[in-house]
Image (cartoon, rainbow, N blue to C red):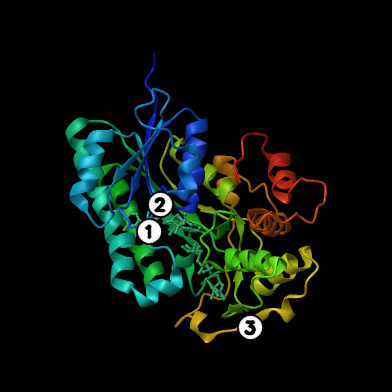
Amino acid sequence: MTQRKRALITGITGQDGSYLSEFLLEQGYEVHGLIRRTSTFNTDRIDHIYVDPHNPQARLFLHYGDLTDGTTLRRILEEVKPVEIYNLGAQSHVRVSFDSPEYTVDSVGMGTLRLLEAIRDYQQRTGIEVRFYQAGSSEMFGKVQEVPQTETTPFYPRSPYACAKVYAHWQTVNYRESYNLFACNGILFNHESPRRGETFVTRKITRAIARIVAGTQKKIYLGNLDSKRDWGYAKDYVRAMWLMLQQEQPDDYVIATGETHAITEFLDLAFTHVNLDWHDYVEFDERYLRPAEVDLLIGDPAKAKKQLGWEPSVTFEELVHLMVDADLQALGLASPNGDGSTSLDNAYIRHNVGSMVD
Ligand code: NAP
Ligand code: F7E
């Protein structure tokens, strides 16, 4: 029997880590993930795919570790012997990175370097080729120097998080060029889903709407509503990560929809979906402002389309609706479709027949 391909994912408990795990398991991989020890459970997003490791059917395995702990990263690499590594672990909240800059840079920037060094050593000693994916971000474009942003647009990061991602990006390029490592940077624009962290603006809005409909919340407090983002669906974006590592040559790719929308447009679509007017519920709170803002992001995914055959499958409106529906359903409330189906069913299944969990 041929051995299963083994992948290691840092950040497996996050939004993308959970979707990527599902995707790789569907592709027949054995999946290993790095998890942090926390005083409360942090595996909600992957509990549904976890099987006890004593079970011969088990193909998902978890290992305690942290990107700030290089010794453990090396040990896990030796134990797991992965052929693909997806570096998704990060303190990923931009606003929080201004409050906790040192930790953010340590996990995002130095964490990537620690992992790259561990891979370089491992590959040189064993001769086993390891393919590496780095979770880069459109935040690296920050104060944008070009519209739309492509793989060649200069970076202008505007937060400790973005500065650390730029550092990780260039280290990844350097390890590719210096040590012949198969290393790819995905420059992913914002991608959302029902599993999006509750403090990012999209999920904060859709979760609040469900509570407003349920009568348990009256207002939602937000910061700057003027910024524009290129928002896609997370499940589409993890497929792009995998595609990058299946190419003949390593390269860097922008993954985006090519459309940009203001937060007010997200509010309009989301509240209208439940027949409410957002102006009646949204209040301003300056605590959510950032010392420096990224005003406009819009990516050009032409290279990914041409070389990877990748395209987004869910429109902006479908994304907003599927997120609202999922949060309504989580509270046991009916989706406005009224036929028992959800926008997620309608949007994603139409494009990608296959298993889905949300
Ligand atoms: P997320 O939901 O915030 O998940 C982050 C993951 O990283 C979690 O599993 C978290 O573990 C883990 N983590 C945090 N600090 C760590 C550390 N010191 N060591 C090891 N793991 C650590 O993020 P996401 O939205 O899935 O994004 C995945 C990656 O893509 C991140 O690197 C993010 O910066 C990047 N990215 C995201 C987007 C987007 O729009 N979602 C766009 C571009 C790039 P816990 O569960 O224990 O907290
Ligand atoms: O903010 C504004 C905020 O936190 C979007 C991360 O995944 O994508 C994400 O970073 C916009 C900003 O995402 C609130 O000022 C207004 O202009 O949802 P966000 P982000 O900062 O774009 C990139 C690509 C990543 O790489 C990151 O890891 O919304 N905004 N009011 C607010 N934002 C939040 N969070 N909360 C508010 O109340």
Residue beneath label 3, please?
A: 283
**Picture disc at residue 88:** 2
Q: In which quadrant of this rendering is ligand 1 seen? A: bottom left
Q: Percent position (x, y) of residue 12?
A: 41, 47
Q: Are marks 2 and 1 in contact (CB under 8 Å)?
A: yes
Establish whether ligand 1 lies closer than 8 Å to the Cβ of label 2. yes
Element on which disc 3 rests:
strand
Q: Work out whether 130 lies above or below 65.
A: above
Which mark sits nearer the N-terminus, 1 or 3? 1
Nearest the viewer among 55 and 59 is 55
Q: Percent position (x, y) of residue 39?
A: 33, 57
- Frontmost of labels 3 and 2 is 3
Residue beneath label 1, please?
A: 90
Give the crowd class for mark 3: few <14, some 14-19, many >=20 residues within 10 Å. Answer: few
Establish whether ligand 1 lies closer than 8 Å to the Cβ of label 1. yes
- Frontmost of labels 1 and 3 is 3
Q: Say whether residue 218 is left or right of residue 71.
A: right
Q: Quadrant of residue 226?
A: bottom right
